[in-house]
Image (spheres, rainbow, N blue to C red):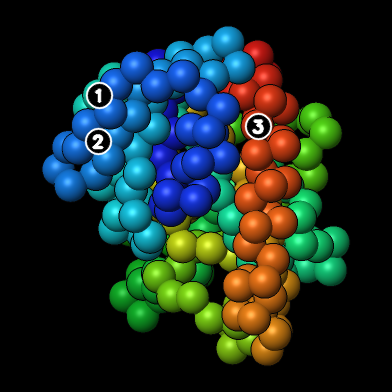
């Protein structure tokens, strides 16, 4: 069964609000829902913010029988095309705050068991623009990290996606991710996030039928 792993309640509500929920419980401190929406059964784990929470949520989903994982939510834009309210499909993700260069001589983001910084996600040609997602355990305006984002070819930035992709890749389970842009890189991003979050969430909810179409039929 498909399991979504989502950081914040407001993000989860973009799916839960259009779903028929058959079961709700708390496991290992994580709220879990099971139900159906848009003609398909699904589970959802509300994991919490950050990479540790995201990885724990993904592992919980797998133990509950997930045969594919879905991460959706909001993210900050980096490139000019990543405007507030646009929804992107992630085709690769990188943990930009992970660095073993001093020991292994590998590029920033390269996990010890990998040869590349990038973690793959399922993606194909469709209506969604494609993005490289930069994931790190900090919420900033992105200015200080901008040169690293550029070097990594990142389009969006947030705090969970690459950790979920890592767990899925290690388990050999397909993983999909979709992000709606809530703010743009720069000194106004925190204010913009607060003001535009609802717009991004509305765009994400509007895209949910197309997201399910991609996950189940892509």
Vertical arrangement, residue 165 with respect to residue 41, above or below? below
Question: Distance from label 1 to label 3 (Cα)?
Answer: 23 Å
Vertical arrangement, residue 190 with respect to residue 119, above or below? below
Question: Distance from label 3 to label 2 (Cα)?
Answer: 23 Å
Q: Where, by quadrant of the figure, is residue 130 drawn?
A: top right
Q: Residue 53, image x and y in percent?
A: 30, 54
Quarter containing the N terminus: top left
Please report whichever mark, 3 or 2, sits nearer to the chain's N-terminal start: 2
Residue annotated with mark 1: 64
Q: Nearer the viewer, mark 3 or mark 2?
A: 3
Q: Residue at 72%, 27% (x, y): give it.
A: 210
Q: Nearer the viewer, mark 1 or mark 3?
A: 3
Residue annotated with mark 3: 208
Q: Residue at 68%, 25% (x, y): give it.
A: 209
Which label sits on residue 60?
Answer: 2
Residue 22 shows up from this direction: yes
Vertical arrangement, residue 57 with respect to residue 114, above or below? above
Quarter containing the C terminus: top right
**Are the residues at dot 3 and dot 2 in contact (C-beta closer than 8 Å)?**
no
**Are the residues at dot 2 and dot 1 in contact (C-beta closer than 8 Å)?**
yes
Question: Distance from label 2 to label 1 (Cα)?
Answer: 6 Å
SS state under label 1: loop
State left or right for residue 37 relative to residue 138. Answer: right
């Amino acid at each position: 069964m498909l399991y979504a792993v989502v950081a914040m309640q407001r993000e989860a509500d973009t799916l839960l609000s259009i779903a028929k929920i058959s079961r709700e419980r708390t496991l290992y401190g994580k709220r879990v829902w099971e139900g159906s929406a848009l003609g398909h059964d699904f589970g959802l784990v509300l994991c919490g913010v950050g990479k540790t929470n995201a990885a724990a949520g993904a592992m919980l989903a797998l133990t509950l029988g997930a045969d594919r994982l879905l991460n959706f939510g909001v993210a900050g834009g980096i490139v000019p095309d990543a405007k507030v309210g646009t929804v992107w499909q992630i085709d690769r993700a990188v943990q930009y705050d992970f660095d073993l260069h001093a020991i292994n001589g590998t590029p920033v983001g390269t996990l010890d068991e990998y040869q590349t910084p990038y973690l793959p996600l399922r993606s194909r040609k469709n209506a969604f623009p494609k993005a490289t997602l930069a994931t790190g355990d900090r919420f900033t305006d992105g200015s200080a990290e901008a040169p690293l984002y550029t070097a990594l070819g990142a389009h969006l930035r947030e705090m969970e996606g690459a950790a979920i992709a890592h767990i899925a890749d290690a388990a050999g389970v397909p993983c999909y991710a979709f992000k709606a842009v809530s703010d743009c890189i720069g000194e106004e991003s925190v204010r913009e996030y607060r003001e535009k979050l609802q717009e991004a969430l509305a765009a994400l909810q509007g895209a949910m039928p197309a997201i399910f179409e991609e996950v189940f039929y892509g």
